[in-house]
């Protein structure tokens, strides 16, 4: 997700800045290389997720199979955007079309280790594959939105691309204690919403509010964090009205889902404050590890990651805009209490409202390192 960088030199007889045919060719090849790299990074990330958590095939109450049937326990039953999409595709396509699509995708059920009951049903196996494919597309969208948002912070293309890429590769690690396919689309929607707020495109924000809440109800609480970014382009009153409208859209979308699945087992929320208290008071979280990418790696709340994130903040904080600092502070004020009250202990993915800020901080740290690099200074001097 970087912008190809070229030196303004024509010593070899052509202009590589894009004015001549060869320059245009170089730009096209540069963009194609970046696209290929982005696709590989997204694939690596969701492979890390899937090998770690798959689709919770061994936990019937929250498995993808149960979600597709509409029988998942609440609140997991509410997270329907991807599930409803693949069910809709299944409803309007014939068995022959499913088989053609299956061959075109080249995704063998044996590779994904789907449950035997899923493999036995061609319709359900196809929907499992479509969920995987949509999750992959969500990862690509997350990478693109992350890059665009970091650029909106004034971060250079290389640092913005590196920050978004590293964040996406770290994403399976952040899915600690639990991880779900809709986590990728959740973060992609968060970043897109903030980017739209920064541009003042309130109509698009309303659409995102609907889709993001359909994906996961957490957006209802996240919407207010766009307020500091809206203030960059809108008045205080207008910003408040836009945020309120987005919250109303999110609330109505959630209410539809709540009524729709009112008869399902479970509840709209579960209290975990006692579990959280015990988890953090013991101190063992500082040395915990989890298997991600096939390796035993430190848990996101462990000491190595605390030091790493603290270092990134110390290095890159000066590049973070005032509006983004306020957004991050507001997100923390909302997310941390919700996390402690209603989320499973150690489940770092439930701090997702802080993820846009984390991505920006990582990109800002890359910016600082790049500016202190002699190679970067030389490249800037040539351009």
Image (cartoon, rainbow, N blue to C red):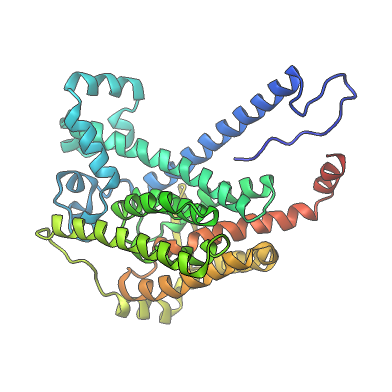
Residue 279, given in percent of the width and then of the height, sits at 38, 76
Residue 213, placed above or below residue 302: above
In the current view of this chain or complex, which residue is farthest to the left? 263
Name the quadrant of the C terminus. top right
Number of dots carrying numbers: 0
Q: Which of the two residues, 142 or 24, is positioned nearer the viewer here? A: 24
Depth check: 182 or 326 in front? 326
Residue drawn at (31%, 59%), measured in percent from left and top? 250
User: Residue 361 at x, y = what percent?
Assistant: 61, 61
Horizontal placement of 279 versus 87: left or right? Answer: right
On-image quarter of the N terminus? top right
Determine the residue positioned at 37% across, 71% down. 339
Q: Can residue 58 be seen here?
A: no
Residue at point 41%, 43% (across, down): 138
Nearest the viewer among 162 and 220 is 220
Residue 16 vertical placement versus 295 (above, below): above
Q: Is residue 277 visible?
A: yes
Where is residue 203 shown, x and y percent of the image? 41, 50
| Whether residue 290 is situated above or below residue 192 in the rendered picture | below
Left or right, 113 with respect to 285, comes to left
Which x, y percent locates residue 269? 24, 69
Q: Along the line of sight, which residue is nearer the eye, 367 or 115?
A: 367
């Amino acid at each position: 997700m970087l912008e190809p960088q070229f030196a303004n030199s024509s010593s070899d007889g052509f202009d590589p800045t894009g004015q001549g045919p060869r320059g245009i060719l170089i730009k096209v090849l540069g963009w194609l290389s970046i696209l290929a790299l982005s696709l590989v990074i997204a694939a690596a990330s969701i492979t890390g997720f899937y090998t770690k958590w798959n689709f919770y095939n061994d936990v019937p109450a929250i498995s993808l199979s149960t979600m597709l049937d509409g029988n998942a326990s609440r609140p997991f039953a509410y997270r329907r955007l991807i599930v409803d999409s693949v069910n809709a595709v299944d409803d309007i396509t014939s068995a022959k079309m499913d088989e053609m699509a299956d061959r075109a995708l080249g995704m063998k059920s044996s590779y994904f280790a789907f449950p035997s009951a899923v493999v036995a049903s061609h319709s359900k196996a196809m929907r499992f594959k479509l969920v995987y494919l949509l999750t992959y597309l969500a990862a690509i969208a997350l990478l693109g939105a992350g890059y665009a948002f970091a650029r909106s912070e004034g971060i250079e293309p290389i640092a913005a691309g590196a920050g978004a890429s590293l964040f996406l590769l770290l994403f399976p690690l952040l899915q600690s204690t639990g991880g779900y396919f809709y986590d990728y689309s959740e973060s992609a929607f968060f970043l897109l919403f903030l980017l739209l707020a920064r541009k003042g495109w309130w109509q698009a924000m309303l659409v995102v509010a609907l889709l993001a809440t359909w994906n996961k109800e957490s957006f209802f609480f996240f919407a207010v964090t766009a307020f500091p970014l809206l203030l960059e382009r809108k008045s205080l009153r207008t910003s408040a009205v836009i945020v309120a409208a987005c919250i109303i859209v999110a609330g109505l979308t959630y209410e539809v889902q709540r009524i729709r699945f009112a008869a399902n087992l479970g509840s709209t929320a579960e209290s975990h404050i006692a579990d959280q208290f015990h988890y953090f008071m013991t101190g063992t979280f500082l040395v915990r590890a989890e298997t991600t990418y096939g390796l035993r790696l430190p848990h996101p709340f462990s000491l190595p990651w605390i030091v790493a994130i603290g270092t990134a903040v110390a290095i890159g904080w000066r590049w973070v805009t005032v509006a983004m600092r306020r957004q991050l502070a507001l997100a923390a004020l909302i997310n941390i209490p919700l996390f402690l009250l209603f989320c499973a202990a150690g489940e770092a993915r439930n701090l997702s409202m802080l993820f846009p800020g984390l991505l920006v901080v990582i990109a800002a740290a890359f910016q600082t390192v790049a500016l202190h690099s002699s190679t970067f200074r030389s490249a800037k001097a040539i351009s």
